[in-house]
Structures are given as C-alpha cells and as structure tokens.
Image (tube, coloured by chain):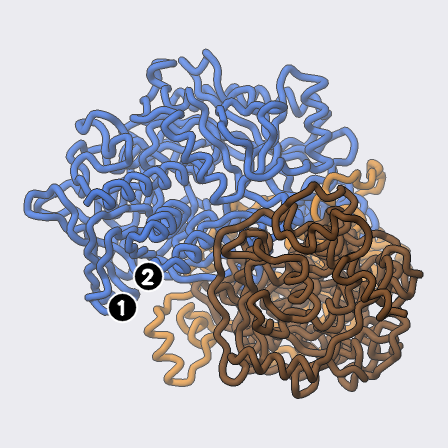
Chain colours: A blue, B brown, C orange
Amino acid sequence: MPSEQDLSADVVIVGSGVAGSSIANELVRAGISVIVLEAGPRVDRQHFVENFRNLENKPSYQGPFPSVPWALHPPNQITPNDYLHTTGPDAEAYQQVYLRMMGGTTWHWAGCAWRYLPSDFELKTRYGQGRDWALKYDDLEPFYYQAEVMMGVCGPDPAREDLGSPRRQPYPMEALPISYAAQQFRKLISEKTPYRVVHEPQARNTRPYDNRPTCEGHNNCMPICPIGAMYNGSYSVYHAEAAGARFVPNAVVYKIERDSANKRVTAVHYYDPDKGSHRVTGKYFVIAAHCIETAKLLLVSADEQSPDGIANSSGHVGRNMMDHTGVQVTFISGDKALWPGRGPLETNVIDNFRDGSWRNERGAYLVHMVDDNQVDLATALAISKGYVGRELEEQIRYLASHTVRLFSHNEGLADPENRLTLSSTHKDMLGIPHPEVYYKLPEYTVKSCEHTRGLFRELIGLMHGTDEQWTPGYFPQDHPAGSTIMGTDPKDSVVDGFCRTHDHENLFIASSSVFSSVGTGNITLTVAALALRVADTLKKELSHA
Amino acid sequence: MPDVARKILWPALGAGAMLAALSTAPARADEPSAELLARGKYVATAGDCIACHTRPGGQPFAGGLSITTPMGDIISTNITPDPDHGIGKYTLQDFEKSVRHGVRRDGSRLYPAMPYVSYSGMTDDDVTALYTWFMHDVKPVAETPPATSLNFPANLRITMAIWNLVAGESEPETGDAATFDKLRRGKYLAHALEHCGTCHTPRNVMLSEKTDSYLAGASLLGWYAPDITSSKTTGIGDWSEDDLVAYLRTGHVDGLSQAAGPMGEVIEHSSSHLTDEDLHALAAYILQVPAKEDDGEHPARARAGQALDTPDIRSGELTRIDNLNPMDGKGVYDANCASCHGDNGAGTGDHYVPSLFHNAVVGSGHPDNLIMTVLEGVNRTANGVHAYMPGFDGKSDVQRLSNAEIAAVVNYVTATFGNGDHGVTAEQVGAQRVQTPKTP
Amino acid sequence: MAADRSCSSTRIHLATPNSMRMAQALRMSRRDMLLGAMGLATVAVGANPGLAATVDEDTVAPLFLALSKRLTDRETLNPQISQALYAGIIHAVPERRDQIGKLHALMESGNFSSARALATAAEHADPVFKDVIHEIMTGWYRGVADQKVVVYRSALMFDITSDAIYPKTYAAGGPFYWTKTPPEVAVPTGEPALSPSKFVVEPT
C-alpha cells in the first residue's frame, strides 16, 4: 500500500484505459510526474485467454472478465443487469458493457480505429441537428495521427480508398488483407448495388509493430486477442510505467476535493478494496474513467460546495447519453460458401450512409459485415433443428459456411433527457451507488435504424438469404458518449474545446463523455486523440508554470 | 609462396596507383571504382561489422553496443569515417592493423570481442575494399560511445597483447578471394569473414577458441551456439548443403531449425545477403568440418518429438480478472504458446510459425536457446520475411512470465516435443534473464 | 435461465485482496476461498476426485460411449472426452444415468444402421430421449455439458470444419491465411431425426 507522502504528482489521472494511460505515457516522457489511479486490478492476458476457452457462452465478450467487487462492471448486456441499471422506453438498447481494470475496455474492442468525419464535429451548423463540438476536425487531425501511431493502426491508401477524413500522413501500417468472405461481400456490393465496402482502419498489426506480432487471424479480437496483435490500453500503462509513471491499481476514486473558491481541484480520494481511504494531491487532475464511470464519479462527489456534483454548474453532468444504437440481423446466404470467421472480426464496412444531406432529418450509420466464426452457433442451431450424426455434420458445415451477420452503428443525438443518475437502491461493497441510465432512442436515430433495416432487407435479397433472425429491438454498441458534454457555453456544457471543465480550471476530462455528437465510427480513436490533445495542453501549461 | 605474395602486395597493395594512393591518404582523394565499393560493402556484410558496431536504434557503425563478455561489458566503438569520433584519420595501414591484428591507430590493443583473430585471414584485396567502402560510403557520425570499463586485469589493454600472443593469428589468405575454388572460398568465408568460430567454437581458459574443437558448440550471452560440426548425432551432419544454405539465407528450415538471438542477427545483417554461390561454398565447407561430439546433445536435436494429440479437457471454470496466479507448464503453453505454435506443436500451415517438434532449438540438450527465445522472442528479417515472436520477459507488452513459469513451460515443451525434461529451474531462467544485451 | 447463469458467473468472487491474504495465512487454497465466496456447495465434476472415481467405475459410462458412437455415426470417439461428458451430463441431471442405460438398451434391441434411425425411434419410444440425445449431441459437437465447457478445441464441430476454419484462439494458418478460398459446401440433403426445438440465442 502506498504511503501518503508518495501520493502526490504534477498530474493525477483517474482511469487507465486508452485515454488515461496514453496521457500518462505522454506526460511522464516529458518529465512530468504522474500518478494513475485505476479502480480495477492489474491484469494479464494469459488468464483471459484461458477464461475465454472455458466460457460456455462464447459470444459474451464480457464473459471472460469477471469483475472484482470493489470495481464492478456490467456482467453482460442482459436487462435487468447486476450493475448498470437502465430504464425508460429503450432501456434494453442502452445496456452497455465495459471493463474496469488496467487497460480498460480496449481489452475487448475489435480494434476499429475510425476518425470522425469533419461534418461530425459540426452537426448543428451543417444539418441543424444536435450540437456542434467546440473544436473542428482540423484541430484534432495531428492528434488523430499521433493516436494512430501510438496504437499501430492499419488502413487503406487514401488515394485508393478515401474514407472522408482528410489525412496528412499515410496510415502507420498497410491495410489488412481481407478475408475471402469479405472479398465476396465486397464484390457483390460493388457489382449489384450503388454502395461500396471499404477497409476498416484497425489498431491491428499487419506487420510486427511496437514489439507485438502480426495478426494471425484468431478471430477473437473480442473478447481477447490471444497474441497481442491488437492494441489495448495496457500497453500504454506498461510504457508509462517504464518511463516512471506511478500506476496504482485497486484505487476506487470516490471524492474530488476543491479549494475554498471551488475553482481548483486540490485532491482526489480513493478507497482501497478494504475501504481504507487515501488522498492524492496534484497540480492537475484528469478524469479518464469511461463515459459512464466518469459521470458517476462527478455525481458521487457531490458535497456542500457542489450539491449537484463536481463540474456540474450547467446541470449537464450525466445528461445527453448517446450511443451508436443499431440493428442486427443474421441470415443464411443462398450463394456460395463464405466461411466467415477466418481472420479478424470486423474489417469491412459499408460507409455510404456516414454522411449526406439527409442528416437534417435522420441519423447517419455505417454497416459492419461481421466476419465471425459461426461454427458454435451453427452447431447449436442444427441440434435444435433435430439433426443427429452424419446429417448433423452436414448441417453444421453448411450453416457455418453460409451464415451472414450484419449490424449497424446508427448515430445517436444529444438529448438532455437521456440521463445517467445514481441508483437510489443499489450500492457496491464500498457504498458507492451503481449507475442508472434513462434512455429513449431519439427519433433521429429511430429513422436511421429504419433506413438500415431497409438496406439489410435489400442485402438479404441480394444474397438469396433465408432464416433471417433479427435481434429484437435495438442493439447497444457499447459506445456511450455525452455524459460530460463539450461546448462553448458553460451554461449548457461541462467541458470546453480542450476538455477542460468550465467550472474547475485544473480539471480535465478524457473520455467519450465529452463528445457533442457521436457520428458513426467507433469512438476509441477519437477518445485517444482527444486524450493526446489533453496531454499536449498539460505539457504546455506545466512547462510555463 | 604466400609470404612472397604478401610482401609483393603489402604495403603497395596490389594493382593500381589509386590503391597505392589510398594506402597513405586518409581522405577520399579519388573516386574508387564501383566494383571496389561493392566488394567492400560485401566484405563488410559478410564480416557482419554492423552487428557489433551499431547499437539498437543507433546510426550504422557508430558503435555504442554493449557486448557482454566474461571479463565485463565491452562497448563497441564508432567506426564511421568521422575524423574525431570515428576512424576518419585512419590510413589503410592503420585500418589493416586494427582489422587484422587488433592494434588501434594509437597503438593500444583491441579487446578480443573484435574478431581480428578471424579477420587476420582476410586477403589484402578484401581489406582494401573494406577500407575504401568504409571511408567512402559510410556516413560519418560525430558521436563517441561511452568508453569500455572492464575489471582488472582485463582493463589493462596490455593484457590483451598477452592474450593475443596466446590466441595467435592466422595467416592472411592470398590472391583474389573471388576466384577461390568452392571449399577454399567456403573456408575463407567461414574463417576470415563470417568468423563462425567466434561464437560456435568453445574457448579455453584464456578465452581463445579451442582449435581442436572447431565449431563444437559454446555458450554466449545466455544463448548457446550449438555444435555445427559434421557430427550426425550432435552436429549438423545430417543437414544437406541446401538445408544449410536455406538456413543461412532465411533463418528458417522447416522441420529442422530457425534462428533467433545472435544467430538471427547474423542471418539478418550478414549471411542473408551473401550470393548463392558463397552460401553454397560456406555450407559445403561447414558441412565437412570434422565431427566433434557435444556431450550435451543426445539424441540428434532436430529429429526429436512429434505432434501432440490429446483432447483439451477443461474445468469450465472462470477466474476473476485479478487472478495473476502462476500457471503450470502446460497451462502457460496453452495460454501463451498454443495460439501460434498450435496445441499440437505443429506451428502454422505456412511455416511462418515453426513446429516445436523436429526443431533443433527444442530438441537440443542445451535448453539455453529455448529459454532465451521465450524471454526475448524472435525478431529477424531475412529474405523479405520479418519473423517475429514476442518475448515474455519483464518488458513484454504481450505477457510477462515469471522465471518459474518460463522454467515450467520450457520443461513442458522439451518433454512434450523435444528430448525430455531438462529440469530447468527458475534460478537458471533468472540467470539468463539478466544476460540480455544492454545499451549504455 | 441464461440470465441467471450469466449473473452468477460475475458474482463469483467477492473476496478482496486482504481477505485473500487472510485466507492464505489460514492455508485455505485460493480455490476454496473463491468457492466459499461464491457460496456454492457444488464443485466442477472434473475437479472432484470422488465423483471422477465413481464415473470410472460407473457401468453406464461405457454404454454412454457406445451410444455416442452410434449417435455421431462414428466408429471412434475419444474415451477421455466420453468420461468427462458423461460425468457432466449426469451431474446436471442425475436421472440421465438411468435414461442413458435405457437408450442404450433400445439401441441394442434393434438394428439401427444410423444415428438418425436410432434417434427417430428413440423419440417415438419416449420423448425424454430427445433431451438425452440433445445433450449427447451438445456434448460431443459443442463440447459442453452441464452448461460448462468440457472440451473446446477438441469438440467435434471443429473436427468437421477443420479444412476451412480454426477454433478461435487456435488459428494455425499463419498471417493472412484468410485471404485464400475456403472449400465449397453442398446444400445438405439429410433429414432431421428429432422434432425441432425452439432455438434460443444466449444474450451477450
């Protein structure tokens, strides 16, 4: 257990996911002292690999990560859920999962490393919907590239496949060669439809990179890459530690202390698993604890000075909860065998609906053709149909080679009514309330999902599909955003364009919680780019201090 | 005859006024011929100068690599043509003296980490070509690596002079090395350029190579440079010339062996760049080196083992995310190795990942290289292929294994796919863990 | 119910590092500790020597293997896997022991030339045999019994697809193997043997 005098640094960071760990690594390499407080434990890969193999419900990507009781995370996407309580008309569509441990949720992302489109930052100006960010694409471009280098992102040559987000440098690694299934899908879309399929930029090695091996196509990006070919936040934790950052696991921050003027944060307090309390002081503080946990922490820290929670003079902490709530369908193709599941999980996307003038009335979306091994599902399905012996084996081969799964990321919209609050009924072992989220899918997103369903029906027809199974209702994408929304006006936003809280000059937030809109691409690269920009700001301020 | 030839060639150094001029002038007075430069570059590659004279991430030939020896760490010097930090002021004669005789321009002795005992066999033509290329084509780097500081008595360079007397030198080869017949060319490559014996020949108490045990296997830096004599049981006598050529070109022969560590570097920087003809000459020569049995190698190391075929009966139990408990050998293998090497040890179908049975590193009676490979991984680019395996040491981002876990998995792998459990202990792994090369 | 099961798997461990240190001081194994925290009285079959011993001596266990061969239309099946699956199946539902014996007797009483013929006759004779056969198929093909993984990569579903695809985390084709063309698969013509059941996809 660290002694109290050790618990002081130039910058104190709460959370060791991609955001917190990359800030720590940047700062410590610039000679700035850093403490990273992680609620969950130090972890390693080998036990997760074995957990996955021992897991009966293989598609459950939260499954191999049973949480520790002092830092619970949602056990699965089932409603009701043991930890994250969702309510409202679309409660089930907001059943997000994430991981509270060293390295954070990037242990089980699929490595999709999209840049947002320039238009995503100006939704209000361009389309009269939602909100604008307090920064522009160009402000973030250098940090997008820095994040791509840090993670090791592979992607297509922009001259051949322009993904709509202007680049000053090529991707750090060449695009991933695509699977046979994806090649066939690409061919079909380009020959038979007006749409296109593009390479998904991915934080995945197409050559040895950063002391990690080339992807070998284990098809297990979610829940656990067994060989480390995909980026996860633990690498940045290791790199930061190697450079001298102090990493404190099992440190559950529950209180944010300010000066008498309530302008500067002076310390954070954390519980260890036995509820011993520790105070950590610093010059600057960064909350990088995931969209849901960040808002929860700001609300939990409410006190007499700030009865509605920290950084919450606007009342917007916990509001504007967004996601890429989408739709999903699985069907059996009537065409040639595809054998999905050879290679990485998510590599190809239909991107025609990421932007367009129609965004003034319905949300954008992108479509993943999921390249997921279907053998287990095919076997369970064939058994349920009553096959045995030789006929069962024929069925397994056929279903496993012909199953197609499509899902979409549909653009959410900031709505203050979609709100995270503290549970009045559930507390964890440390006495900290569980988070609760009210969610009603915005009309804008509902219209987008309707459009997606139409597209899916068109594609099912094209592939002579049968046995379609639509995931009931809407599908949470675990891309929560908006709970400490960014804006220029302190009255209706929590942070400014540099992710600094309007209320507290030395408190920053590095998380998707600052997003003003969610666009369509997976959120992680934008989280990392914003975090690196926070690091840049802190480096400048600390060098002048 | 050789003596005569030597006298004739030295110091005038063969044909042409240009070369004669070079022998006295350190500067780049004239434009040397493209052929001479190409030959010099080739000699530098075959001699693998870059391996020691470049630190990881450093400028080529600027030195700074720390080389661990039983006497202490020796830091390689800057041999770029920078006049103040490198060898820019060296005349050809100065250069020849250091390369072939281990004597620096200032008269002090080089440490025997520099394989001048081998290089002393280099022909005059090749020394000249090498010098010309260094002076003309290598980019000068104005930096001086830290000085070597050894323990007494090796810190006295005079000790090196005495050592040198013991170690002896070989006579330089004579004539045009490009025209030698196959075996003579092979011998020249093995001795004077590639200096195979520097690592593969065991050393006597004075750290000189044991001449009666040429290429019979020796330890270095935690690795074991195995017996590569023609012994069919403990050497590589059952390899074909083509096998050895393939190994030296690519670092990998399916069902036999692959290179990592120092040998991986030799292949990456040196042997993979040799001509086909030279590779065959070198292989033919090595394969006729008299057999010398290595007592640690029974039975033949590359023939052991077979694919494992056992079901993966499981507990079906999960452990909590904070479980960092050590695993047993089989568990470590399944969780960290099996994804690439296969549960059956067969590697990948395209041989990018080698099989663990029929693998000289696993089948060896010396588990050193397997331990080092688990610690440091493989990182070798040759023939257009970047072979890469992550290390599992304390710097790994993929998985950090304890000494006990590495000992357990090494014992599991040799017992399952090699020639039995060698009883590697955590202490042994710990001792090898600290052997990794350092950069000052 | 799937939801209940998934929830219990995350409740597994309520111990804190300090309580674990205490347990270690008291010489409790971590496993005892975790199981204690789970409040579970049951232990995984494979890890329980008492039960494993009874399965070794269980006279129905060999019948399970013989029955499995018929129901998979295979001449050879791994006996170790057979033992482990049998143990899991009768652990989940003890009556299965008796039912497996009866199903084996039914098989012996007739001349069933295929898995399908036996399965059809069995469901006709007693609807409970449908469940028994489902569990046997789930065991051998998915590697699951008692809602737990008994074998993963050794499940038969991977054996019959090994010319095309690898079990996740055991890909053995090397980088970019996935760009190559996998085998074509003909539309199956065989009929099911049992009446269909509702197919429930477990939530993630």
* Contact (Cβ within 8 Å) of mark 2 with mark 1: yes
Horizontal and vertical percent for residue B433? 55, 73
| Residue found at x 74% / y 70% | B118
Q: Is residue A244 shown left or right of residue B378?
A: left
Residue A248: which numbered mark, if any? 2
Horizontal and vertical percent for residue A327? 52, 30
Labels 2 and 1: the sequence-earlier one: 1
| Residue found at x 24% / y 48% | A285
Q: Quadrant of the C terminus of chain A?
A: top left
Q: Which residue is mark 1?
A: A2
Where residue A6 sits, quadrant-wise, is bottom left
Q: Name which residue type carries label 2.
A: Val
Horizontal and vertical percent for residue A129? 35, 17
Residue that extends furthest to the top in the rendered view of this protein? A357
Relative height, residue B440 to residue A89 (above, below): below
Q: Quadrant of the N terminus of chain A?
A: bottom left
Viewer-proximal residue, A470 or B191? B191
Instruction: Say if labels 2 and 1 share a chain.
Output: yes
Viewer-proximal residue, B276 or A306? B276
| Residue found at x 68% / y 36% | A178
Q: Secondary structure at mark 1?
A: loop
Residue that extends furthest to the left in the rendered view of this protein? A260
Relative height, residue A544 to residue C52 (above, below): above
Relative height, residue B26 to residue B406 (above, below): above
- Disc 2 residue crowd, few under 14, some 14–19, many 20+, Cα 10 Å: many
